[in-house]
Image (spheres, rainbow, N blue to C red):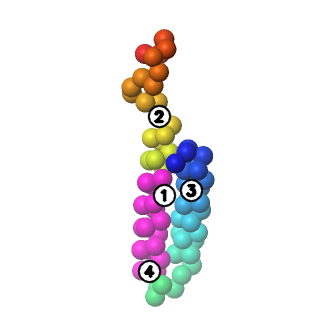
């Protein structure tokens, strides 16, 4: 997956987390447990996407070409 698509998915996941947090604050006691579970799942997905975006942004530790590169 390209970094742009990952960033879009990360943004959507962050929006979902914020929406669930707001719902949790306003929810009655009977619904809080299910909302907490949904929030945990959404937060885990958001964290995973964030790690994937960061991994895509990092420069590889190995050479990707044989041209002279003074950075190595």
Q: Nearer the viewer, mark 3 or mark 4?
A: 3
Q: Nearer the viewer, mark 4 or mark 2?
A: 2
Q: Which residue is tagged 4?
A: 34
Q: Which residue is tagged 1?
A: 46
64, 54: nearer the viewer:
64
Single out the residue that lies furthest toward the front: 66
Looking at the image, tell me whether mark 4 or mark 2 is earlier in sequence order: 4
Image-quadrant location for residue 45: bottom left
Number of numbered discs overlaid on the protein picture: 4
Answer above or below: position of 3 versus 63: below
43, 60: nearer the viewer:
60
Looking at the image, tell me whether mark 3 or mark 4 is earlier in sequence order: 3
Crowding near the residue tagged with mark 4, few <14, some 14–19, many ≥20 C-alpha atoms within 10 Å: few
Q: Helix, strand or loop at disc 4?
A: helix
Q: Helix, strand or loop at disc 3?
A: helix
Determine the CA span between mark 4 and mark 2: 37 Å
Magenta region: 32-49
Looking at the image, tell me whether mark 2 or mark 1 is earlier in sequence order: 1
């Amino acid at each position: 997956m390209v970094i742009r698509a990952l960033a879009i998915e990360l943004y959507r996941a962050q929006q979902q987390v914020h929406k669930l947090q707001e719902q949790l604050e306003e929810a009655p006691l009977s619904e809080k447990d299910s909302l907490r579970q949904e929030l945990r799942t959404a937060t885990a997905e958001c964290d995973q996407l964030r790690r994937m975006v960061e991994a895509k942004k990092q420069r590889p530790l190995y050479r990707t070409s044989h041209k002279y590169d003074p950075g190595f």
